[in-house]
Image: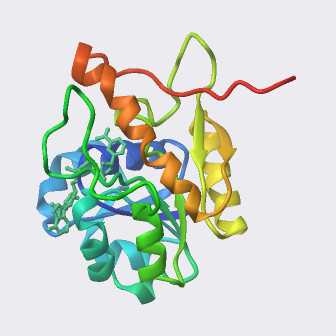
Amino acid sequence: MKVGILGSGDVAKALAGGFIKHGHQVMLGSRDAGKLKDFVAQHRGALTGSFADAAKFGEAVVLAVKGTVALQALEVAGAGNLANKPVIDATNPIADAPPANGVLKFFTGLDQSLMERLQAALPAARFVKAFNSVGNAAMVNPQFKGGKPTMFICGNDDNAKATVRGILDQFGWETADMGKAEAARAIEPLCMLWCIPGFLRNDWFHAFKLLQRE
Ligand SMILES: NC(=O)c1ccc[n+]([C@@H]2O[C@H](COP(=O)([O-])OP(=O)(O)OC[C@H]3O[C@@H](n4cnc5c(N)ncnc54)[C@H](OP(=O)(O)O)[C@@H]3O)[C@@H](O)[C@H]2O)c1
């Protein structure tokens, strides 16, 4: 599959590395593709371009930019370039204010998630929340003593979610589909919980697992 990745940060690079490892083609998009020079040198076949180039390139697109500018980045990428495509939304609505006792501040409330805002602004794109509730170091085929971790996903389009489930299978995750876009109100704050051990104890390697009845 051709995957366009909007972003040049740790998440964009971790996921791009995972897609390449699993035989997909990737293009990373940035306002300054030059900053991906080292990544390209280390990953044969990785392409770079603008946000619009990456969105156009992808049969599926990953959104991996700072939450406060997510909408802006999507607008620059172009609604037309994202129409009818799965858009894997890894962002979190982290506010610029510092955490309080290790608890991040969000610029959204409990009754509206960032992904719902993005979905409302770009109705033809098929947003699927995923990869937001784990650190970039554990996104691709993580090894945990307790076995496969669980990725919570949600989104309005079942075909887009099936695509994301296939990617998560390759990346070594169990998928827990929490339903429509509104479920992002619960999935985005998992990031707050995930980060607390990091801020309090410098422990940044863990993941959630949903235990189910046999
Ligand atoms: N770090 C993690 O382990 C982790 C884990 C799960 C989820 N997340 C979420 O994933 C997202 C990406 O996180 P990250 O740590 O990789 O990077 P980040 O530092 O949060 O974001 C970097 C990206 O944001 C873009 N950006 C910044 N200001 C911009 C602007 N004014 N207009 C357009 N784009 C702008 C940058 O674009 P340019 O390339 O143009 O500079 C860059 O690609 C965030 O929403 C974060 O909350 C992070």
In the displayed structure, does residue 88 sit left or right of residue 52? Answer: right
Residue 139 coordinates in the image, percent (x, y): 45, 36
Q: Quadrant of residue 152?
A: top right
Residue 46 coordinates in the image, percent (x, y): 35, 56
Residue 69 coordinates in the image, percent (x, y): 23, 66
The N terminus: image quadrant? bottom right
| Camera-side residue of 154 and 77 | 154
- Residue at 41%, 80% (x, y): give it: 56
In the depicted structure, whether residue 124 falls above or below residue 39 = below
| Camera-side residue of 30 and 176 | 176
Q: Quadrant of residue 180?
A: bottom right
In the image as oriented, which residue stretches furthest toward the right?
Answer: 214
* Colour mapping: rainbow
- Residue at 43%, 35% (x, y): give it: 134
- Residue at 66%, 60% (x, y): give it: 161
In the image as oriented, which residue stretches furthest toward the bottom?
Answer: 80
